[in-house]
Amino acid sequence: MKIKYLGTAAGEGIPALLCNCEICKKSRALGGKNLRARSQALIDDILLIDMPPETYSNFHRYNIDLLNIRYWLVTHTHSDHFYKDELAYTSNGVYAHHYDDWHGIDIYGSIDLKESLDKVINTEKHKKYMRYEPKLPFVKFTCNEYDITPLKANHGTENPFIYLIEKDGKSLLYAHDTGLLLEETLNYLKTSNLKLDLVSLDCTAGSMMDYHYPLHMCLGWNIKCRDELLTSNLADQNTKFVLNHFSHNGTDVVYDDFRMIADKYGFITSYDGLEIEH
């Protein structure tokens, strides 16, 4: 599998709008990898994870054709991960002119999405191409060559998910947005008999070793989570651990600064445009 990080920031982005904090000023001045759009990822060019407000610009930025995407996973309903209004402009015949035999996109997420999606995908023609199927936590489903299991996240919506994605003997745990893994999620993983090849962890608070907010993580909690996965034999020395979803309210989150810290602990620091094959 290949993962491409299209955006790697929390809800404010880095630099944030109308912000003059030291993180934003330094990131703005340095540019390049220090500039972060809100979190979004693409697996093997056909499986999209989340839909932030930057989705439109991300597709141009990375030369991605939405017509080639087949599947869409949504983690939760916060607007930096699910900017539903953008879907109104995918309606065929008025806002878009895709070909009639287009395969369309299958959208998966929790039942939380249904009311919002029903408001923007509300004609039979639109529903033909943009199809939503709600999923339950811990119930594996298959789409094409992928086996996908929604897992319960520790976050601030009614039914937030993180995702376990498997294909051709490879496995990816995409854990954004969430605090430390819930016991029932960790227990499910322990029964999976998997060795995770890549784990992408929330690091909203940056280099802090402890954090007062239970619905996101910091570097110290990333270390704890990795140790838990290693102890449970779900990961080993070959597992890649990537840190992602940074907030300008975190500590040392400017990419040039944080990368040096994360390297010391054996973590990969994500940046917009990073591609990893595993």
Image (cartoon, grey):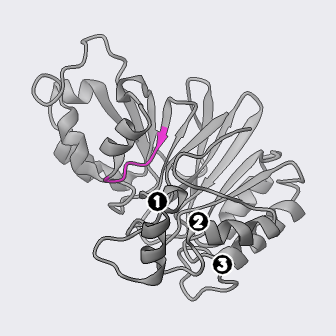
Residue that badge 3 annotates: 207
- Residue type of the residue flagged with mark 1: Arg
Image-based side of 192 in relation to 153, left or right? right
Q: Answer few, some or many: residues within 10 Å of disc 3's Cα (few below 14, many 20 plus, some between 14 and 19).
A: many
| Residue contact between numbered discs 3 and 1, judged by CB atoms under 8 Å | no
| Residue contact between numbered discs 2 and 1, judged by CB atoms under 8 Å | yes
Furthest-front residue in this view: 29
Say which residue appears at 39% left-offset and 40% top-offset: 61
Q: Which residues are magenta?
A: 48-53
Comes first in the chain, label 2 or label 3: 3
In the image shown, does 133 or 213 lie closer to the viewer?
213
Residue that badge 1 annotates: 36
Asked whether the viewer can see residue 181, the reply is no
Q: Secondary structure at mark 2?
A: helix
Furthest-top residue in this view: 101
Comes first in the chain, label 3 or label 1: 1
Q: CA distance from mark 3 to mark 1?
A: 17 Å
Q: Answer few, some or many: residues within 10 Å of disc 2's Cα (few below 14, many 20 plus, some between 14 and 19).
A: many
Residue that badge 2 annotates: 255
Q: Main secondary structure of the magenta part?
A: loop
Image-based side of 76 in relation to 34, left or right? left
Residue 196 vertical position relative to residue 262 in the rendered view, above or below: above
Q: Quadrant of the C terminus?
A: top right
Comes first in the chain, label 2 or label 1: 1
In the image shown, does 73 or 205 lie closer to the viewer?
205
